[in-house]
Amino acid sequence: MKRREFMKKGMQTSLGIGVGLTILGSKSAADTSANEKINIALIGCGGRGVALLHGFNYPNNTRITGFQEFPDVNVLYCCDVQKSRGEKAAAPTNAKYAADMRTVLDDPKVDAVVNALPDHWHAIGAIRACQAKKDVYTEKPASQSGWEGQKMVEAARKYERIVQHGTQNRSAEYNLEAKKYIESGKLGNIHLCRVFNQKREMNSFKIKNDVKPDGLDWSAWLGPAKDRPYSSTILNRNWHELWDFSSGDVLNDGVHQIDLARWLIGKEFPKSAYAVGGRYTDPDSDAQTPDTLIASYDYGDLLFTVEETLYTNYMLKIDGLVRQSDMFPYWMQCATRIEIYGTKGLMIVGRHGGGWEVFDRPKDRKPNVKKSVYGRFPDVEHKRNFLDCIRSRKLPNADIETGHRSTALVHYSTISYRLGGVKLDIDTKTGTPKNPEAAQFWKRDYREPYIIPDEV
């Protein structure tokens, strides 16, 4: 395929969801034209970062294209505080390895960064990139705290940056069709939306302090979090279940369903929120986040709920074959489904290619399906939309403000949970909880020099 044909196809497949909403005036760092390559850098070379850069294959051999495989992209850096990971990520490319993100951000040749750092670094990395006049593809969740998310939006607007949040569902054609179906009134008035995040990870572990490997800057990895001895237990994924770094799987993964559901039903900040739950399967685990959580959000005319379980190995996350085929999940035990209850029908939606179906009252005790649409995993389309928006300066499909608003719903639930199930009243204009006791969790404490200033 010729380059011109590829660019034309890419513009078509990016759906144009954000077209016409807002046009940013500032060009990218190198003032890229349509005939120039976009110079990018990867910051954070863990599993997701490497997948974003190099791509991967699904079981049916469907190729999910990585950023480095786009003909209009040039990779300049792979940056990671762990030298071995950074060098390994850079090896298949002509990219340089950098241990410090400041090396990347100080280079005027870099147009954009792919921010695949751990959750507690997402906001700092994205804000610093905006300040350096780089566009940003930032992984979900947007932030580790609600205040951080607000600052990310401020930075994106102040420095006129394209910031795409990694909630790819907004770039999926099948989800756009679902949204149009709802907006047409065919589902009727919607008064209940249920979101599920049910996995087989019991988040059960004990933290071991061991010998730090050579080539790892542990203090930099901790970043804004309080200092603590090196632990491979924490470094190797279990940071997800510690408050210093994340808020559990509902933040790290459940935000995908939450964002998709909120977009489909057209809601922003709720009037109030509360959550209850606990650590029931292994109370002696060093994990801090709950393994069972039910959150409820009041929108006045609609109740939005999120239900999470992390010990349910009989629930099935939508697998790669379903994501890339004309298949639906087994909805009854789909771990990442969304149920939207309208006065004219029930819509069940799967994320990342699960498709959707609308059910009417059963006939003869058998399902009565009114509408079915298959889906495909829109990872490539989401990347393409980001690259197109770097050139056009139009807001991307998952602009950081939408990412922040969806992530804020998770923050409300975890704040309520940590306060013992307190009902939070939300300022629907700013998204900030009104309860004074919530402030301690809305903005985290930062360890020097890894801070976010009040004025970004």
Image: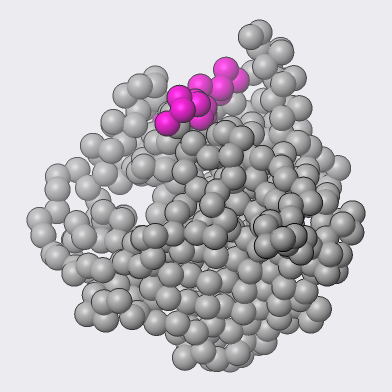
Taking the image as shown, residue 226 lies to the left or right of residue 117, namely left
Determine the image quadrant of residue 273: bottom right
136 vs 368: above or below: above
What residue appears at the point 56 percent right and 78 percent down from the top-left corner? 295
Taking the image as shown, residue 125 lies to the left or right of residue 47, namely right
Can residue 298 be seen in this snapshot? yes
Give coordinates of residue 389: x percent, y percent.
71, 36
What residue appears at the point 39 percent right and 20 percent down from the top-left corner? 94
Magenta residues (range): 59-77
444 vs 101: above or below: below
45 vs 236: above or below: above
Give coordinates of residue 404: x percent, y percent.
62, 62
What residue appears at the point 27 percent right and 81 percent down from the top-left corner? 283
Colouring chosen for the image of the structure:
one colour
What residue appears at the point 63 percent right and 60 percent down from the top-left corner? 338
Can residue 265 be seen in this snapshot? no
Q: Quadrant of the C terminus?
A: bottom right
333 vs 16: above or below: below
Residue furthest left as drawn: 211
Which residue is nearer to you in this view: 430 or 12?
12
Give coordinates of residue 124: x percent, y percent.
48, 57
